[in-house]
Every structure is written in C-alpha cells, then in structure tokens.
Amino acid sequence: MSVELSVVVPIYDEQESVPELYRRLTEVLGAAVASYEVVMVDDGSHDRTWELIKELAARDAHVKGLSFSRNFGHQMAFTAGLDHVDGEAVVIMDGDLQDPPELIPELVARWREGYDVVYAVRAKRHGETAFKLLTAAAFYRLLRVVTNVEIPVDTGDFRLMSRKAVAAFRRFSEHHRFTRGMVSWLGFRQVGVPYARPARHAGETKYPLRKMLRLASDGITSFSYLPLQLATWVGVAVAGLAAAAFVAALVAKAAGSLLPWAWIAFAGLAFLGGLQLIAIGLLGEYVGRVFDDVRGRPLYLVGETVGFGPGERRPAPGVTA
Ligand code: UDP
Ligand code: MG
C-alpha cells in the first residue's frame, strides 16, 4: 500500500544520532502527513547503527531499513533509498540531524502547492569549520560558473521530490553521482525553501577531505566539459607565447645577446611538460568515469533489508533475499 510521504536517510556510523533522528522524525511526520515511511539506508556502518535500525523496524512498522554489503557512499545510499520508496512524495535527508526534520512540513506544503522538487537552501550554517564554510561557498560558486545546469547555490541534497521526479531520477544509470545536480537536471517545477543548518547532533563528519574532493569532482565532471576544454585554451595561449618568445630570441641573438639559452629552453620545456600532465590528469578524470559507466557494474549491493513486507515492493537492484 502506498504512503503519502517517504523519507530516505543515508546513515554511516551514526549510532549516537539514530534514536534522536527517529524521535524527531516520528514527532514531525505523524502531524504533517496522512501516512509515511522512513527508509534508513545503512551505508556499511561499523558501529551499532544497523542493529538500532533493526530494533526500530521491529517496533514501528513505519521504519524500513536497507543495509549495504559495504560502504558505497552517501550519494549511492540516496539512490538505493529512492529505488525502494513508495511515497507520493519523497524527502531525502542526512542522518546526523543537520537537515532538521522540522523543515519537512514546509517542504510538504510547497509540494502540495504543485512543485515537483522542493530543495532546502542553507541560509545559515552552524557548527562548521571556517575551512568547510569557505570551500563550500567557493565550490557552489565555481559550479555555477562551469556547469550548464542551473544548480542552486548553498543547497545540499536535503529536498523533497514528487513521485514523478523520483520516477525520472530512477532512470539515471551513472555510477558517479552528484544527487543535487542530477535533480536540478531533471527540470519540472522546482522551488527553494531557506533554513538555518544546525551543527551535527553527535559524532564527527563522515566526509573527510578526500571524500569531499571526490564529490566535488563528481559534480564538476557530471555537469561540465570545461576542464577538458581548458587544455585547448591553455594550449592555444602557450603556443602563442612560444611563438612570440621564438621571435624575441631570434631578435636578441641577432643583437648579440649572451643569455644562457639552454636554461631558458629547459624551463620552458618543464613548464609545458607540467601543463601536459595536468591536461592528461583532467582527461583521466573523465576517462575513468566513462570506464566505470561502460563496465556497468551494479550501482550498489544490498546485504539485508528489514521492514519491507514480503512481495510488498518491486524487485529492487541488488536485493538478493
Ligand atoms: N554518510 C554515508 N556514507 C558515507 C558518508 C556519510 O551514508 O560514506 C552519511 C552520514 O551518516 C550522514 C550523511 O551521509 O547521515 C552526511 O554526512 P556528513 O554529515 O558526515 O557530511 P557533512 O554534513 O559533514 O558534509
Ligand atoms: Mg553532516
């Protein structure tokens, strides 16, 4: 039986937050919609997260859980959740309570007005390091410049999607996912709702710099060819400079200059070599992603599920039992 609202939450090693997340979601959802389900996606946690999800599901039929066979990442957890929901509308949100459940009624209200995507805009952010604030602000603005899709700035993945938008989202097959960009790409009627982003409820960020950089490059490579085209433009500029330098060298030679040409030539060659390696590296970022998509491995694997009644859902990718 279909529900009015589904909530998808990726969770990775958040045992301190799960009970509070459940408490606040239950309080809000019970009042906001006629019927709901909460699909918690355990992204290969090493702590008691999955046990807690199973306990909640045993106690409360609103709660359903998926457990990945290993850590596939936050973005893939959203995808798995979206593959398994059944609501007329679906909210996707983080599990550390930085996406406050109390905003959900506002998202639902805009959806009832007829919007297909209602995204939450971070008007204020609390409890983040200066480094994170600065890099995030810079990244969203860079993204705006280099991509050809309108991706709203200062917006994470916290959003509501209509059933129509979810059905469209399920047609994506790419392995490297930047959910907020993909949802913007869908089109339909979209609108933003501002909110103040609180600090984490407990624990540490599960996005170390390495994962953040990967997400950033997934965002850029998914929606822009600019890094590839950069090589062309830099190449044109460098070739122009080299031609000018050649002419200057001939003139200087004729005038009897004693400059050590070998050193100058060496510096020029090393500089060019560096540029070429950078261009090849950028190319590699795209080629690697093409390789992953061409190989067509499963996007994720589910090890265990809880709370989904037998035969209640369409067979979803990766569900074995
Ligand atoms: N997360 C996940 N898999 C990961 C990393 C994070 O499912 O590999 C979850 C995490 O538990 C949280 C959400 O994704 O619910 C956002 O992560 P986090 O709060 O660490 O990111 P930040 O808010 O610091 O950018
Ligand atoms: Mg967080």
Image: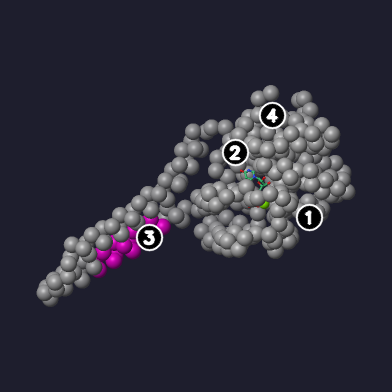
CA gap, disc 3 to disc 2? 36 Å
Q: Secondary structure at mark 1?
A: helix
Q: Secondary structure at mark 2?
A: loop
Residue 284's x, y, as percent? Answer: 42, 46
CA gap, disc 1 to disc 3? 45 Å
CA gap, disc 1 to disc 2? 27 Å
In the picture provided, is 43 more to the left or to the right than 51? left
The circle drawn on residue 72 is 2
Q: Quadrant of residue 169?
A: top right
Report the magenta residues as a range: 230-244
Q: Secondary structure at mark 3?
A: helix
Query: Badge 1 is on which residue?
Result: 103
Query: Badge 3 is on which residue?
Result: 233
Residue at the limit of the structure toward the bottom, as seen here: 255
For marks 1 and 2 on the same chain, the one whose residue lies earlier in the sequence: 2
Residue 311's x, y, as percent? Answer: 76, 25
What's the amino acid at mark 1?
A: Leu
- Looking at the image, do the residues carrying marks 3 and 4 touch, with CB atoms under 8 Å apart? no
Residue 102's x, y, as percent? Answer: 80, 54
Label 1 CB-ligand 2 distance < 8 A: no
Closer mark to the observer between disc 1 and disc 3: 1
What's the amino acid at mark 3?
A: Trp
Q: Residue at x 62, y 60 (%)?
A: 129
* Mark 4 crowd level (few <14, some 14–19, many ≥20, 10 Å Cα): some
Label 2 CB-ligand 1 distance < 8 A: yes
- Looking at the image, do the residues carrying marks 4 and 2 touch, with CB atoms under 8 Å apart? no
For marks 3 and 2 on the same chain, the one whose residue lies earlier in the sequence: 2
Q: Residue at x 86, y 48 (%)?
A: 27
Considering depth in this image, is 86 or 67 the residue closer to the camera? 67
Q: Is residue 86 above or below residue 94?
A: above
CA gap, disc 4 to disc 2? 14 Å
For marks 3 and 4 on the same chain, the one whose residue lies earlier in the sequence: 3
